[in-house]
Image: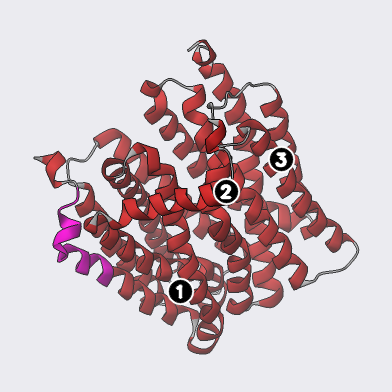
Amino acid sequence: MQEKENWKRKFLIIWIGQFISLITSSAVNFAIIIWLSIEHGSAEILAYGAIAGMLPAAVIGPFAGIYIDRWNRKKTMMFADGFVALCTLVMSVSFYIGYESLILIYAMLALRSVGSAFHMPAMQASVPMIAPASELLRIAGVNQMIQSISAIAGPALGTLAITLMSIGNVLLLDIVGATVAITALLFVHIPNPEIPEKAKASFEQAWNDLKLGFKAILDNKGLTWLFAYSTIATFCIMPVAVLFPLLTLQYFGGGKWEMSIVEMAWGIGMLVGGSVLGIFKPTIRKVVMINMTTIILGISLALSGVIPPHTFWILVGLTAIGGIVATIYNASFMTVLQEEVRAEVMGRVFSLYFSMAIIPTVIGLLGTGWVADFFGVNNIFIALGCIIALVGVFSFFNRFVMELGKKDSC
C-alpha cells in the first residue's frame, strides 16, 4: 500500500515522458506515410507498410502479454522504447547515406511493431501496480486524452517537420521522444506482482494460458459473435484507414497539409467522442451503441468516396464524425469485455482479440493495394464503408449479441 501513496507524482513523471514519446512517434509515423505517398503514390506500397507495422505485433501479442506478466515491467518498457528508437535510427542512417530501400523500411517498421507489442501491454499492466483501484477509471480517461491529443498534434508536427527537413532528420524526432520516455522511467519505481515459481515462463504454460483465453471467448456465444462481427468490420476498416492519405492526394487533389488536416480531424473527433462519454455517461446499452456506431462509421466512410472532389471540407467533417463514433465504439466494446470476461483471463482475451481482428486484416491489405490502384481509391471507400454499415445492421438481428449486458441493465 505504501508503494501507491505517491502515485500522482509517479504518473506525472511517466505521463510527461509518454506524452512526448507518443507525439514524436505519431509525427514520425505520419511523416513516413507522407513520404511514401508522395514518393511512390501507390496504394500497394502503403498497404505493405501497414502490414509491416501491424502483423508482428498481432502475431506475438498474445505471447508477449503472457511473458510481460512474468518480467520486470519497468525494464520491459525501457528496453522496448530503446529497441524502437534503434530501429528508427537505422532507417535515419539509411536515408542519410542515400539508401532509400523499401525492403529496409518495411523491415524496420516490422521490428518497431515488435517493440510496441511489448511496450503498451507493459504500460497498461503497470497502472494497477502504481495507482489505487479507485483511480483506475480516472487514469484511463487521462490516457485517452493523451492519445487523442497525440493524434491531433502528431500529424501537424510530422507535416511541419517533413516540410522543413529531410525524412532522415524527421526520423530523429522519434529517438528524442524515446530518450525522454526512458529517462522519465528512471525516476520512478514500478512494483511487480509476485509470480509463483511453478507459474514462471515455459512454452507449455504460455500455451495453456492462451487456451484459457480462447475458452473464455467461446463459452460466451454473444461474445463469440461480437468478436466475429468486429473482426469483419476491422477487416474493412484497416484498408480504408491506410488509404486516407491517397484519397486526399489522388481524389481530392490535396497535399501535405490537407493530409495532415484529415488526420487531425480524426484526432479531434476522438477527443470529442471521449469527452461525450465522460460528461454525459449515456444510459443506452453498450451493445446498442456498438451497433449504431458501426453503422454511422460505415456510412461516413462510404460518403467520403461519394462526395465530389471539390468538397474537401465535407471530407474533413465526415472524418471527424468517424473519429467520434470510433471512440464511442472502442469504449463500449472494451466495457462489454470487462463486464463479460473474468478478471483473471481478461488480459489474454484483450490480446487475443487484437490478434484475431488484425491477422485477417493483413490478408485484406494484401489485396487492397492493387484493387485500389485498379478501381480507384474512392470506390474502395464506398464498397468497404457499405459493408461496415451492414455489419452493424446484422448485429441488431443477432439475439446472442443483443443479450450481452441485458442482465446488468435490468
Q: Where's residue 43, x and y in %?
A: 58, 77
Magenta region, residue range: 390-404
Earlier-in-chain disc, 2 versus 3: 2
Tell me if residue 273 comes above or below residue 199 in the rendering.
below
Left or right of residue 336: residue 240? right
Tell me if residue 243 comes above or below residue 209 in the rendering.
below
Name the residue at 50% across, 11% down.
Answer: 5
Label 1 CA crowd tier, 10 Å (few <14, some 14–19, many 20+): few
Q: Is residue 399 magenta?
A: yes
Image depth: mark 1 or mark 3 in front: 3
Q: Secondary structure at mark 3?
A: helix
Q: Which residue is mark 3?
A: 79
Q: Where's residue 366, x and y in %?
A: 55, 78
Residue 325 in sight in this render: no
Q: Is residue 243 magenta?
A: no
How far separated are the C-alphas under marks 1 and 3? 47 Å
Q: Which residue is mark 1?
A: 310
Image depth: mark 2 or mark 3 in front: 2
How far separated are the C-alphas under marks 2 and 1? 46 Å
Residue 135 falls in which quadrant of the image?
Answer: top left
Name the residue at 57% across, 61% down.
Answer: 54
Say whether marks 2 and 3 touch (CB < 8 Å). Answer: no
Name the disc covering residue 64, or none.
2
Q: Where's residue 303, x and y in %?
A: 34, 72
Name the residue at 63% across, 32% down.
Answer: 72
Nearer-the-camera pick, 314 or 31: 31
Q: Mark 2 is on which residue type?
A: Ala
Q: Mark 1 is on which residue type?
A: His
How far separated are the C-alphas under marks 2 and 3? 14 Å
Residue at the right extreme, as displayed: 97
Name the disc covering residue 130, or none.
none
